[in-house]
Amino acid sequence: MAAKKTTALIFVLGVWLGSSILLLWVVGSSFPGVERAVVENNRLAAAAGFAPGQDAAKKVSVPWVVAGELNRQYFSGWNVGQLALAVCALVFASRSGPRGALLGLCGAGLIVLALTFWLAPEITTLGRSLDFVPREPPPAALESFNRLHGIYTALELVKVTLIALATWLSFNFLEAATGGEDPPQPVS
């Protein structure tokens, strides 16, 4: 029975880890994607309000602001999903699995709470206050936004590392619990 619970834990951790990496890729490519779309699509370039390489104009353009708003929505939805995954992972880890995995998941869960209820709302408010605001001279709120964004990114990377560590510990625990052998498979 412990092997089944540990397998369920590993499944939840895999979903959480894979989804975290996927979201980091999606949001990490959204702003460079705005520039790439303007370079590759002449009709879009004519309507976008900036030409490739015009950083000041790009950051006050509609495509740039839409990319920012989509990122805010992605993170908002993902953070709610992470809360559910964290609860599931903590339940499975508390019922079976190594203590190290449970401790790592407690840390990851606390990070998700901070991201969801502190950083994401602050970044959303500051980000929206910067929408369509010229960057020359840099607006006062930009420094706070960049600082909070850096903290969010660092915590997200720590969270991914903790989930990866919990997954590795859980795999090792499962291997030790089953004697290194695959559990018997049901006959069809």
Image: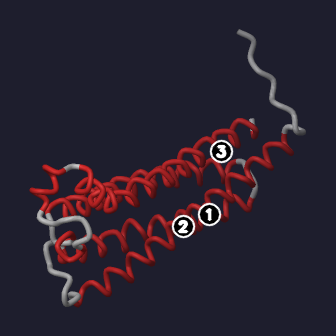
Q: Is residue 25 above or below residue 126?
A: above
Quadrant of residue 157 within the rendered picture = bottom right
Element on which disc 2 rests: helix
Q: Residue 51 versus residue 181: which sits nearer the camera?
A: 51
- Dot label at residue 161: 1
Camera-near label (2 vs 3) is: 2
Residue at left offset 72%, top offset 48% = 96
Three-letter code, disc 3: Ile
**Residue placed furthest toward the top:** 188
Q: Circle 3: is it few (<14), some (14-19), or many (20+) Cα within 10 Å?
A: many
Residue at left offset 67%, top offset 59% = 102
Give the x, y percent position of residue 170. 73, 50
Disc 1 versus disc 2: distance between alpha carbons? 6 Å
Quadrant of residue 161 within the rendered picture = bottom right
- Dot label at residue 157: 2
- Residue 172 placement, left or right of 82: right
Give the x, y percent position of residue 70. 26, 56
- Dot label at residue 25: none
Q: Circle 2: is it few (<14), some (14-19), or many (20+) Cα within 10 Å?
A: some
Give the x, y percent position of residue 57. 17, 73
Disc 2 versus disc 3: distance between alpha carbons? 19 Å
Residue position for label 3: 10
Q: Is residue 184 above or below residue 1?
A: above
Camera-near label (1 vs 3) is: 1
- Residue 50 placement, left or right of 30: left
Three-letter code, disc 1: Thr
Three-letter code, disc 2: Leu
- Tell me whether circle 1 and circle 2 mark residues in contact (CB < 8 Å): yes
